[in-house]
Amino acid sequence: MKKIIYALLATLSGIVLLFSYRTSLDAVPPSDIASPASSTTQGTSGSASTTTAGTTTGLADGTFTGDTTHTRYGPIQVQITVSGGKITDAQALQYPDSNGRDQQINAHAIPLLVSETVQGQSAHIQMRRIHELAAERYRSGTTMTTPDIHVHVEHIMGTAISIHIVDPRDDAAVRDAVRACVSELRDIDRVFSPYRAESDISRIRAGDLRIQDADPRVAEVAAACADYEHETGGLFSASWRGGFDPTGYVKGWAVEHASRRHLAPLLVWSRAVGINAGGDLQLFTAQGSDWVWDVGIADPCRPGSVVATMQVTNGAVATSGPAERGRHIIDPRTGHRAHGIASVTVVADTLAHADVWATAAIAAGSSDTTWIAASRTRTGLLVTDTGATTRWIGSTPVEVTSASSWAA
């Protein structure tokens, strides 16, 4: 239990200086859950008080306070409250507030990320590094205006999906667009979920429905999967476990299409819009806007740390790897679990394309990077199980040895 809470507090502690975090509470082994007998837990990484067993997600109820983290901006300390096995509150007990700039930024950043923590629970959330961006603008003499970011979180396709609208000028249009986007994603899940017995995919796999007789989107996805299987040389396949199973493609495709259809038009009334589906992003910025999405890439070898950051104006970012779900990716060519890669982050124009190639890269393994030349991606970062990193720009791999920041 301590391990879970400390990891959560560590990720929350990054909200002030990085505004970018990833946390997962739904993949915790039973051995890490506190027993009902627990009443107070203390350790070198934090403390817990008034603790009783949780009943919903496996988290023990109580109030948990993290150690103070000293950053170059100042001290940070976070406290969360768990009730009924769910996070019900999160507070920043200490945060940088020594000057007006810090106070202005954190007055907006802290309530927003606290809200996302409570709403998302197990969300994988990546957002822009407001504090570092502010520091850069401050050094360059540019005045920073705190953005008004509207955030909506839903749980769809087995993951938390958050929609971010920057400086919207038409609240009614935003509500309608978000509602329509969420509705389309739920409808796609109804058709494609392999976990719903009545879905088209489940019926196809059971032999009760033919692809040509299913929802028209199924044939569209099947054709795209066939194209990608050829393009990746078999590193990606929708028939990797026998029968038709496009789950490796559908999430990225669905999020990309729904956001282009319903969210991108909001650029008429906002500076930028973005959608985050379990850490995979489709991002849009209005023409003429100075908005830049700063994306932090989690370090798979050091939980709670960031291995690199990148700046994206328009485009998609997809990350794949075994860090949170275990080695779940199968190499379709061999039928064996892929190994050697801790994580791959791919930046492309579309999320469907980025998602496919992130999966294909895991299947290729650490010794084969020849796929980069054929991938038609913008850039990306590969981290092996040993911590070695390879970054590429277009079709050119570039060896790197430490975290870096670059424009995508």
Image (cartoon, rainbow, N blue to C red):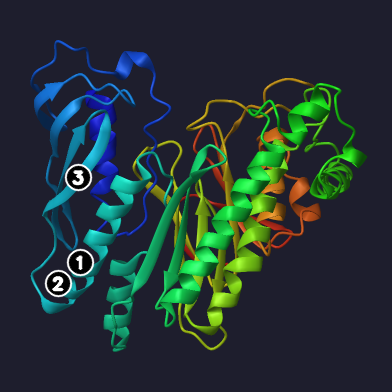
Neighbour tally class for label 2: few under 14, some 14-19, many 20 plus, Cα within 10 Å:
some
Q: Residue 284, position in %: x, y?
A: 56, 71
Along the line of sight, the residue nearer the viewer: 215 or 280: 215
Q: Residue at x 32, y 68 (%)?
A: 130
Q: Identify the amino acid type marked 3.
A: Asp
Q: Residue at x 57, y 85 (%)?
A: 287
Q: Identify the amino acid type marked 1.
A: Asn
Neighbour tally class for label 3: few under 14, some 14-19, many 20 plus, Cα within 10 Å:
some
Nearer the observer, disc 1 or disc 3?
3
Position of 130 with respect to 370 (left or right) is: left
349 w.r.t. 242: above or below: below
Question: Residue 236, located in which quarter of the rendered image?
Answer: top right
Neighbour tally class for label 1: few under 14, some 14-19, many 20 plus, Cα within 10 Å:
many
Q: Identify the amino acid type marked 2.
A: Gln
Q: Residue 215, position in %: x, y?
A: 81, 45
Q: How many marks?
A: 3
Q: Secondary structure at mark 1?
A: helix
Q: Residue 255, position in %: x, y?
A: 62, 54
Separation (CA) of disc 1 from disc 2: 5 Å
Q: Is residue 185 visible?
A: yes
272 w.r.t. 371: above or below: below
